[in-house]
Image: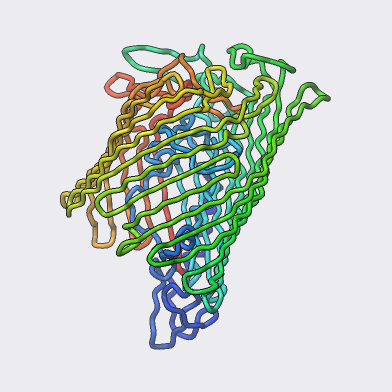
Amino acid sequence: MKKWLYIVFCGFFSVAGYGQIRMPTGGSLGSGQQGGLGQGGQVKIDDSTKVIYGPRTARYFLEEDIFDNHKTLYQIDTSYDDFHRYNFVQRADFQLVDLGNFGTASRNVFFRPIEQLGTQFGYDAYSPYAYQINDVKYYDTKSPYTNLYLTLGGGGQNILRFDHSQNLSPRLNLGINVQRFTTNKQFGTSGQSDSQTNLAQNWGFVFHGNYRSKDEKYTFLGQFNHLNHHVYEQGGMSPDSLNFKTDRGIEYDNPSATFRTAQSWERRNNWHIYQQYVLAQGFQVYHVFDYKRSIDVFSDTDLTNARLYGFYNNYYYDSTQTRQEVKFRLFENKFGIKGRFQGFNYRAHYRQRIANMNGAYTKSYSTTGTYRLSRFENFVGLWLAYYLKDSTQRATAEFEYLLGRDFKIKGEVVSKWFRVGYLSTFTSPTFVQQLYDANHLRWTNSNRLVNSNNIYGQINVNTKQLRLSPRLDYHLINNYFYFDTAAVARQYTSAFSVVRVGGEAEWRPGKFQFLTQTYYTLVSNNDILRIPRFFANFRATFDFVYAKVLFLQVGGEIHYKSAYYADAYMPLTQQFHLQNRLKTEGVVYTEVFLNARINRVRLFVKMANAAQGNYQGALIRGYFSTPFYPVVGRSLGFGVNWPLFD
């Protein structure tokens, strides 16, 4: 796999790199039409003019900016801060938990209130590995823009990304983003000669485009978003392969896995369209269309190990093998008006959703069981915002109502010095929380609304060298859905609360930079929701320049969560559930890294989990992020990013 990635990436460099160093010498490029910054099209030049393409000539915007009537053209990021963070958990500031290796199932560390009204699918364990619809960048370029990214991490962690975008005319841009990554198993194999060392494989891509009419009244944004994700499920380390020693921590030298033949596969296809038209000054109409289709398959052709280790409590139909397939389909249309009136930005909308879930599972060799849920939902909503001198200082109020059911109200005030807000929601449980039926698990739950009331506040203190952002979050939750120790969906009908205090701090004395992020969390009912009491990130870096052209940053970072009974993982339903057998975390995770930039090319080299392993004859403890799933041990990683603007 590594050889294949090297060949492909070097091929990109050899072909596209020639265009990067070739400077325009005269004549016109592309269509030859004149276009100012932010107006698109190619740049017309003559024999006496020299144009250098770069981050300033290939800019992008987000759908949210158009939607809020605050279109901002962002410059391509060429900084190397955080560039070494190729792991999805690290990119989320460790506020995600996976199964020890990227590409595996993931969940949020902290409680997050649900803001999306309507009945959701509920299969989200692999969502971080998909391109997010709201984060897709829409470009306006003066020359073809290509971005190449390659990471070769330790333990078979390989990522390849390819982005390309260009204006076909001054008002039309098309582009594509492609992602491919693979990871290898860290345990449960017989070594390099094992034919099945692969753990996860991911293909993801987005075709996107944007267009605006000549008079700027009509705007169109569209994308086709695809995810194809495959994982060999391991069920964690088999209990009899663990060796616990209080003086040396947890030893794991290629122990056996609970599962040998289990696999999960998820495929998503999302069509998304946003369009708006200016009818009059301060008055626009808009339309958003979404079509989503997801298929989740789990299969295990040999349940011998599952029976041996008691992984499943029940075998309703077949004790030798299991297979299930769950499909989700969504049609959604949103129609609205928006604009500005007497200093206020406003939006009003009507939204309609048609969603259904279909499940099928094997009862025997020739018999299949099925189940189904459908929803037809209608929403109305209103959004108001008052902006001060710029869009960074604002007051917003939002309301949305699912007729006869869900409800959301939100208010927020943002200034340079503080941010405060209130959110109250009543939301429907997900499809998977309401109904599930298969070989090992089954339930039917009422769809009583989940309620959360949330208050948050943050203070911002900024000086030339110091930035402080203390924060408080308070959540009062009622009718909370969770998965019990048997991995069955339950609803807790009483109220409980979550309080989180902490924040971020940054200090920049000269060429040094020190960043810290700490949170302390209290949950009034630890039997239902479990969050590590203490959470901390710390990073220290030093920046310098070598030979006037090579910019370097050397540093290290530390992450820590206090020990707690983290949720276990059930691959049948892609859900994390309560467990009382094993405490996880409680160990400091460290990294040392070197980030570099020469011209526009960025590189990194890092040692992940640097403190894990033998040190002066003692074994520095490894640890579990999810029960019986160890975090990848000490490993060396390398990455490069090469943007091309011609």
Report the side of 250 relative to 482 (left or right). Answer: left
51 and 126: which is toward the camera: 126
627 and 405: which is toward the camera: 405
Would residue 128 be visible to someone looking at this image? Answer: yes
Would residue 174 be visible to someone looking at this image? Answer: no
Residue located 62% across and 34% down the image? 431
Q: Which residue is outermost to the right?
A: 366
Image height of 363 relative to 307, above or below: below
- Quadrant where the N terminus sits is top right
Residue 589 falls in image quadrant: top left
Residue 195, position in %: x, y? Answer: 61, 31
Figure coloring: rainbow
Residue 592 falls in image quadrant: top left
Residue 441, position in %: x, y? Answer: 65, 21
Residue located 55% across and 80% down the image? 31
616 and 468: which is toward the camera: 468
Residue 524, position in %: x, y? Answer: 37, 22
Residue 143, position in %: x, y? Answer: 48, 72
Residue located 50% across and 42% down the image? 128
